[in-house]
Image: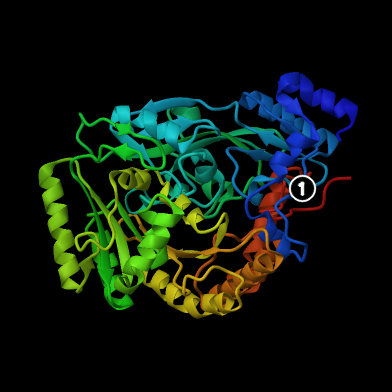
Amino acid sequence: MLEKKVYEAFTKIVGERHISQDLAVMDTYAFQWCNEIEGAQRGEEPQRFGVRPLAVVLPESTEQVQSIVKLCNEHDVTFKAFCTGMGPWAGVSDPRAIQIDLRRMNRIIEVDEKNMYAVIEPYVTNAELQSELFEFGLMHHAQGAGPQTAPLASHTSFVGPGFTSPYTGFSARNVLGVEWVLPEGEILRLGSFDHSGKWFTGDGPGISLRGIMRGWLGTYGGLGVFTKAAIRLFSWPAPKDWKWKTSGTIPDYDWDVPPYWQMYVLNFEEWEEYQKAMYELSDREVTMVATTSAPEGLAALFTNTKQDAIETIFAGLLAKTRNYIVMLVAAHTQREFDFRTKLVRLIMEKYGGNDLIAEGVTTPMPMHYGETVRNMLGGHAFRFSNCFQSTHGGMDTISMAVRLAQLNQPIKQKYIDKGVIGDDRGLGIWITSYESGHMAHMEAPTVYDPTDIESCLGYAAYQDDCNQLDLDNALGMPFFIVGDEVHNFYAKRAMNYPDWLRKIKGAFDPNGVSDPSHYVKGVEKKK
């Protein structure tokens, strides 16, 4: 437990109601999805519980966050900020650490309809923000983790793909400004806000700090606390008078699909035809969604229960499905819709594809349209197990994503044959394009049993093999490069980039109090 005087100092900042060191409460923060995999990779016994924080504090303002951070520096206490939290990167790693839970900072501060940006606090969720944006005919880029998670965390600190990425891009590329409490307690605002009072741009003349702030993957909470973020918005592709309407109950709720929307599952016999079609569909800007998974994944996407998914598989889905693209055409007007759907048909025919929806092989219900734009379909992967994790994730071209999918299959099959991961015949992948095909990535979601030690160890070994594959074949840096050891693995063949990360960490966090476990350690702590 924290020393009494230190605990009292934190209490003075946030009030007695908003601080706790109750062990039962602390364990709820230590219990995280995929902790068991990181433990296995460190050579520890796999378990869901990570390090228990000494205390949890819940600030309500930037000024309180600043005071907490300064106090951590004064008393040599490590901290990790936490929004909605999902995975071990949200937890602490140091036994002498506190968790800064930002759930009281939950305001949508501004929606600028004309300049198309929103300013949000950490605990605003994708669902809450999108609900407000409909009134303006706008949408934001919501990360694939789901509607219950925080867009601020993804935009400022952690990766950032989503189902609408062909249209809305990648979280790192949509940040227009931030309010940032640095590891020593200084408040830094990036972007145009300090100059104009508006958040319309994240960069101005001269050197940009955006790369230091998060780069491609983010610092996973290892470089301070973000208390506000301005994020780019996009036009919501529906008529202005359309309203979001639902009926029924989960999992079989109904949703009024906008009038100019059409879902396709374009199926291609060979990867070559798939790749050409993906390039052209993305480049022509006809689709808001263009994503690929395994045939088993398709069964999960467009069903509502595990039983339905299994019955769909046994009804012949696997035999009729090859390399497919789940597409969503979404338009504002009838003319735009007619043009886009005609292009889809022409491209499909050009590359010898067929539409599995038109043929009745799979049938998305109205709710699945809603699940797609809410970035909820990723959660359907939990149908087959209560846990999965992904390997790979390099961001490059569509052709590299396809190559990575092909090279991954025999590696994955090796661990399937050992019986330690779920059997998707090695085809379990997720590919999406970004920004009209300018980029793409491929990751390999993999089901394992978190209650079985051999399964956890098997998945960890599979992930290590995937990292080696990426390194040996120049297939990009994977999503889950976390901690010094994994960064060091890539260092020699990637221009020793971790040396620069450590210089940044040391310069911004000389006392080492911003938890470095999923970023890098900087210089030694001051004595």
Q: Nearer the viewer, residue 293 or 508?
A: 293
146 left or right of 243? right
Can residue 159 be seen here? yes
- Visible in this render: residue 397? no
* Along the viewing direction, whichever of 7 and 513 lies nearer the viewer: 7
**Residue 294 sits in which quadrant?**
bottom left
Q: Quadrant of residue 132?
A: top left
In the rendered image, the quadrant that contains the C terminus is top right
Residue 211 left/right relative to 487: left
Give SS at disc 1. loop
106 is higher (above) or lower (below) than 421: above
Disc 1 marks which amino acid?
Val
184 shown above or below 47: above
Front residue of 155/201: it is: 155
Q: Residue at x 50, y 39 (%)?
A: 148
Q: Position of residue 430 (x, y in %)?
A: 43, 62
The residue beneath circle 1 is: 51
On the image, the x and y values in percent for residue 396 come to 43, 66
From the top left corner, tell me how far across and down residue 214 is, in percent: 56, 49
